[in-house]
Image (tube, rainbow, N blue to C red):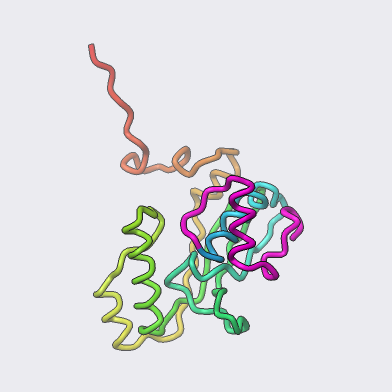
Amino acid sequence: KHYAKIDVKKLSEKELKKIIEKEKIATNGDSWGYYITALFEHFCESKIIQPTFIIDHPIETTPLCKLHRNDPECRLIERFEPFCLGVELGNAYSELNDPIKQRELLEQQQKELNKGNEEANPLDEDFLTAIEHGMPPTGGLGLGIDRLVILLTQQSSIRDVILFPFMKPETEKKKD
């Protein structure tokens, strides 16, 4: 609302798509959640200077996450990301432990992966079988030193600070 002057909770998927098309913003998929994520990344991310927790993400962004307990429309998940100086510093969420819902979400993600969405998760039958045997309430938290180094060194990409050479892009060797 603040940076984009858009109240996404009041807009339909069709209305969000019109804004996406008008602004020529790329998305990772065609749905309400993907549109919100793209609008946030386009209008807001770089403007978040003070330490801030971004909460209540669209379900499409994290298929391993539990549905938000206070969202009757089941469009949001229990997830947060700390931001500072325009950079995401981490990611945390309540793990989804419902095997039926997990399968449904991973099947949707596999379809997105098949369409070319590199950020989508593959279907993992072993993981689904394990959850079917029972999984207690669980949470996940990822805070990396690499992200703090990005912040402190004012780099724009994690690849600029990562220590492991196999994670860096290969450069062409000069031929004599």
On the picture, is 2 further left or further right than 102? Answer: right
Of 142 and 116, nearer the camera is 116
Of 102 and 23, nearer the camera is 23
Quarter of the picture holding the C terminus? top left
Instruction: Tell me where residue 71 sits by quadrant.
Output: bottom right
Residue at the image point whose x is 58% and y is 81% from the top: 73
Residue at the image point whose x is 72% and y is 59% from the top: 6
Q: In the image, is residue 63 above or below residue 47? A: below
Q: How many marks?
A: 0
Residue at the image point whose x is 39% and y is 55% from the top: 117
Residue at the image point whose x is 64% and y is 63% from the top: 54
Instruction: Tell me where residue 12 sits by quadrant.
Output: bottom right
The residue segment tinted magenta is 1-30
Q: In the image, is residue 85 above or below residue 92? A: above
**Where is residue 41 drawn, in percent x and y?**
60, 52
Give the farthest residue toward the top: 176
**Where is residue 96 drawn, in percent x and y?**
44, 79
Q: In the image, is residue 126 above or below residue 6? A: below
Quarter of the picture holding the N terminus? bottom right
**Where is residue 45 drawn, in percent x and y?**
64, 51
Of 100 and 45, nearer the camera is 100
Is 133 magenta? The answer is no
On the picture, is 120 further left or further right than 3? Answer: left
Instruction: Tell me where residue 9 sits by quadrant.
Output: bottom right
Of 64 and 9, nearer the camera is 9
**Where is residue 124 drawn, in percent x and y?**
28, 70
